[in-house]
Amino acid sequence: MEKNDLEIDNLPNRLTFFRMLMIPVVVLALYFTEQTPMLLINFRPWLGHVACWVFVMASITDFLDGYIARKRNIVTVFGSFLDPIADKFLVVSSLVMLLALDRVHPIIVIVLVLREMYMTSLRLLALSEGVDVPVSSLGKWKTGTQMVATPMLMIYDHFLGMNLPLIGTILIYLSALLSMWSALLYSLSMIKKLKEKRAEKRKIKKEAKS
């Protein structure tokens, strides 16, 4: 283990911390769109925009912290653990709030949240087995459509001539379909690699005995 593997205070981790601090801002902005206190009543039409752009900013930090960590070779145990957790917290919190506001169907939220839990479990299994299963292009498309749909559903109004509720709803349904398909492909790929690794181990044992 390298000297800086246990380091906490570095730029990628600061960006991850910042992303986590943005989660309550998104949640509260969405909550106050319905339960608006008198102090914020004049800002009510803009609270969805606040949630949207804070979500976008937090999502950008997700790209930046990974890019900086790879560019500067700053890979730490803490960052490897916290970065995916921060992503899950941001996405799941946003989906739950959109569900509470009746802007997304409960089945879609269930599919997307359970998929995140399932994929996290699979990746932990792959890590424990020493198997490397790369993310498919479908998984990236799923993430892309979800990250575009979510802020649109936060604004949930016509903006710059675009019907954001309609576009966001179409994209979030598409994201749910892609999430199930990509999870299936990932599972099949992982099963194949696990079988190959088992076969390789059996071959090595057989050669060692002979």
Image (spheres, grey):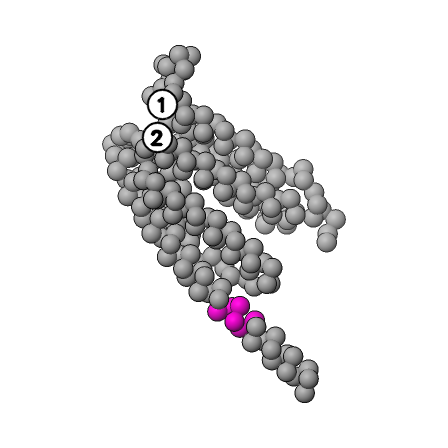
The picture places residue 195, in percent across and down from the top left corner, at 52, 71
Question: Which contiguous range is marked in magenta?
Answer: 192-197
User: Which amino acid type is shown beneath numbered disc 2?
Assistant: Leu
Instruction: Using the image as rendered, state which of residue 26 and residue 105 is in the foreground.
Output: 105
Q: Which residue is mark 1?
A: 34
Prevailing SS of the magenta stretch: helix
35 vs 179, nearest the viewer: 35
Instruction: Report the residue at 51% width, 68% height from top.
Output: 193
Is 36 above or below relative to 70? above
Q: Residues within 10 Å of mark 2 (few under 14, many from 20)?
A: some
Residue type at the position of mark 1: Glu
- The residue located at (40%, 38%) in the rendering is 95
Residue 198, given in percent of the width and then of the height, sits at: 57, 72
Asked whether residue 170 is in view, the answer is yes
Quadrant assignment, res 155: top left
Q: Which residue is mark 2?
A: 101
